Image (cartoon, rainbow, N blue to C red):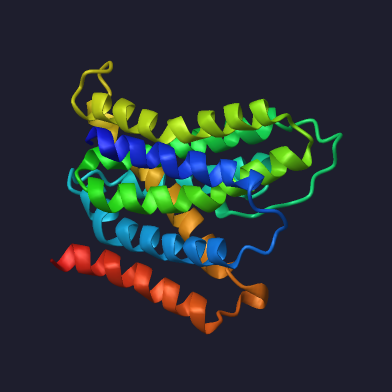
Amino acid sequence: MSIWQSILLFSCAFFGGTAVFLFKGTNHKMLKLVLSFSGAYLFGITVLHLIPDAYHGHDNLVGVFILIGFIFQIVLEQFSDGIEHGHIHKHNHSHVAFPVGIMISLCLHAFLEGMPIAEGHQHELVFGIALHHIPAAFALGSVLVAHHQSKARVVFFISLFAIMAPAGYYVSMGLSNGDIGNLQQYFNRIMGVVIGIFLHISTTILFESSADHKFNLRKMIAVLVGIGIALAGFLL
């Protein structure tokens, strides 16, 4: 991954989160469209690229780790309240898990999301993850502001979240190259966990992108464009 890709990952999350100082309220139609597009795009990339690559090593246990990743994301959301999906919820100020529980959950989620970039599909994944992190970071910033955090603390937490995906990439590179310990033989299983997380995140976004699970025309177009671009990248 080149420097500009690292900057793109960081910048989208950072500016997506700090944009909360510029836009007030919770009716952000453009963010919802970006969320729908990114969810469809991530789903396409996962099915077309990540899952086939994970099975190249003929490890029959990869599927088990995909299930583990799927369930692990469900556990993470008990602490993050679905901010990964761009959801903004009102919290009780006595919520003991805030901000520590939310931040740990989101940072771990973003860190794991950055790991598949080392598999070689850099352009597709960087683009998808960067878009996905815009509404997620905005939701995080909204929650922080709602809990009366100072601007300095909001910027700090957003920056911490923004740096996690690039960090995940560099750690993943070390694992795949065998530079970090002797974990290379388990790399596909680690990727299985990440795939499970991606499947949960992308499908949840798609199913919850509209009230009563119904798509309006604009969101349907956003989803079709996201899947279409992922498919075009695979075929071409």
In percent of the image, x 25 and y 19: which residue is there? Answer: 182
Q: Is residue 67 visible?
A: no
Residue 1, picture quadrant: top left
Q: Is residue 224 visible?
A: yes
Front position in the image: 58 or 192: 192
- Left or right of 229? Residue 220 is right
Residue 147, picture quadrant: top right
- Residue 150: percent from left, percent from top: 73, 29
- Left or right of 95? Residue 199 is left
Front position in the image: 103 or 189: 103
- Residue 188: percent from left, percent from top: 27, 39
In percent of the image, x 36 and y 33: which residue is there? Answer: 166
Residue 5, picture quadrant: top left
In percent of the image, x 23 and y 55: which residue is there? Answer: 52
In percent of the image, x 58 and y 46: which residue is there? Answer: 19
**Rendered position, 231 above or below 88:** below
